Amino acid sequence: MVWIDLNNSQKKIIETINGPILVIAGAGSGKTRVITYRIAYMIQKMGINPYNILALTFTRKSAREMKFRISNMINSKNLEKITLGTFHSIFSSILRKESHWLGYNQNYTIYDQKDSENVIKKILEDINLDISFSPKEIRRIISEYKNNLCSINNGKLNRKEIECLSKIYKFYIQKCHQSNALDFDDILLKTNHLFYKFPNVLNKYRNKFKYILIDEYQDTNLSQNKIIKNLAFKHQNVFVVGDDAQSIYSFRGANISNILNFHLDYKNVKIFRLEQNYRSTYHIVKASNNIISFNKNQIIKKIWTDNEKGEKIEIYCAFSEKEEAQYIASSILSIKKNKKLHYENFAILYRANIQSHIIEYIFKEKKIPYKIHGSISFEKRKEIRDLLAYLRVISNLDDEESFLRILKKESSQKTIRIILDLSKKRKIKTYGIIKNLESYYHLLMIKKKTKDKFKQIIYTIEKLHSEIKIKDSFTIVKNVANLLLEKYPKNYKIEDFKPILDNVLYHTNEQKKLKNNGDVSLSGFLQKYYLEINENSNNDDNEKNKVSLMTVHLSKGLEFPIVFITGLEENLFPSKSSLNKQSKIEEERRLFYVALTRAKKKAILTYTKYRFLWGEKRKNYPSRFINELNENYIKIHNHTKNFSQNLLEKSKINFLEKKNNNEQRKFQVGSKIFHKKFGIGIILDFQNENKIALIKFQNLGKKRILLELALDKIIIYS
DNA sequence: GTTTAAGATCTTTTT
DNA sequence: GATCTTAAAC
């Protein structure tokens, strides 16, 4: 093992093996390196059995990255024995093994966000509730509730709303249980249940996982925190690494207090700090420190670097998103030539996945090889979802959501409604009705043709279901795909299914290489597909030397010589929905900090004057983050100077005003407000140097409100 | 009863 | 724009 590229404090951290350890590590300080080296050190120098090591990450991407880095240091046999992955994938595997304790079948389906929303939609149709929340919002609240170990953490809800929501919640968990399904949050929550209720099971895992390591600890939520606390109780060997400045997952319940209170959760905690940045140039380190200092809530750190000054951060304003993409493409080609770099040295980061479309389009045109690192929900197109619906039902006949998706393909909405009504009345699952169609036929007004279709479906599903124990996942997926192609030649093409077929083939082969043939079952594959498999999965060489396109969220933990940060516009980055809340703006700023600190040599920031987004062309103002950058570290492109100077000036004035008037910052044209006396209204305009707001009230019409006096009477709610 | 077309709604980030 | 829902034509 090579130790030369470690500094003394890094070495010390790596060599401290026992007891609870918290490492506060700034961006670029070698955080991931410390974790991976430490694991290698434990196995090779300390002789610790890799079987006893549990290493957890947050995103699939960092799990893969960590695995890859460790694979360069230890042999594959040892690597295989380490339990390494995301929280969700690791504990889902454990739940699969132990599901009988909790009354679940191990073939349980994992419901993604959309599935959950559909369940909630149906509940709302079933019970008539006077509630103003959309299914989406309800799902979010339920998720928050579960991640907080079933306690409400939201002061905004009134009593009536809580009553309604708890009713919905009851139905929701009932429906999921009947479908033998877990949602993402259940994976953590049920693990907690398992460990609390069954000490013998907990003990087994406590003894197995003698050494626990967690990356990006600032992103953990309470549910995860409790699992770890429970597992680490006996041996107390828990090693966490985090950086509060990079906490960007609060929308998923992540709570910085897990870091702040780490010393309360464990006794005799050793705390280390890594503050030297090895990654980026002086300009980038300085500029990003400067940015993060605008946040009020933070642990003060001194991130410093010995690196060369490097180039200044470049800022470019494009006319449209198309021109933005063209500028990026031509910059890549010229920088690549001048600096003798490769395509893989470039990354393009964006706030929202949708921004990738135009970049892809231009890159294809200019023949720049690229790869999109995306979450699967994004690639999950209709055809694949259809195929998955069959696979999920075949694997788990109780899965109501997926079965309904199949039915919807085969019959009209009216028929579906009748079936659902009957299912509700008789308290029988739709699968039961369709399976015993003869007994219910007189109640359903369906044609013989539809009836025959249904029969055919049931026959197919049951036949394939009977094979899940004897055939491997690849064979079954291939069979179902062929079946769909045969049955609906108009709807599907073989290319539609190629991504998933590649995945399942790769997965099945990998499993077959393992001892005892691994887990080649269909449900094993589905679990992997929903929790682990990422992008075009296989590590083949075709994937190398390409420009990387990804969201800022996914870029965390990675580094690239040249980084483009795109769409730096108010309403996009920071995102529209964050503008009204200080804490959300701070999270966007941390996100920008993450983006900027990915760059080793050069960062190029782009924004557009006009962007076609969500069906309309909008005029944009440069992001406040551009204005927050210290002028010493940036270079505004000449073209941008001529083209967008007014815009920059204007937004600069805007920015300074906002800075001077903290209260003012919350109010925006278009904000919906609630005035204690006048009721609901919407802000139309500001007058008299922003002292007066013109507000249109629902019942009273337009009114001019002196903001200074009204501050405590107005609540902004969107 | 089924298919198609117009209409409405929501547009962040990930497991 | 994309997706899902509802209304009208087949």
Image (cartoon, coloured by chain):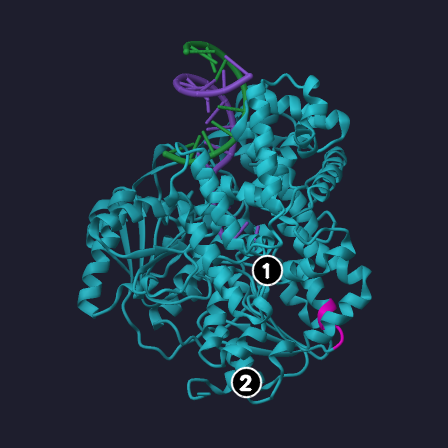
Chain colours: A cyan, B purple, C green
In the image, taking residue A430 as reference, residue A554 lies left or right, namely left
Q: Is residue A164 above or below residue A75?
A: above
Magenta segment: A230-234
Task: Compare marks 1 and 2 and give the one earlier in the sequence.
Answer: 2
Residue A162: horizontal and vertical position, in percent?
74, 38
In the image, taking residue A563 as reference, residue A385 lies left or right, namely right
Foreground residue among A364 and A150:
A364
Q: Looking at the picture, which amino acid does disc 2 mark?
A: Tyr
Q: Quadrant of residue A237?
A: bottom right
**Residue lying at 63% horizontally and 32% vertically, measured from the top left:** A121
Residue A428 visible here: yes
The residue labelled by disc 2 is A41
In the image, taking residue A621 as reference, residue A44 lies left or right, namely right
- Mark drawn on residue A89: 1
C-alpha separation, residue under disc 1 versus residue under disc 2: 25 Å
Q: Looking at the picture, which amino acid does disc 1 mark?
A: Ser
Label 2: chain?
A
Give the prevailing secondary structure in the magenta stretch. helix
Residue A425: horizontal and vertical position, in percent?
75, 25
Residue A236: horizontal and vertical position, in percent?
71, 77
**Residue lying at 67% horizontally and 56% vertically, measured from the top left:** A188
Residue A359: horizontal and vertical position, in percent?
30, 48
* Membership of A231 in magenta stretch: yes
Figure label count:
2
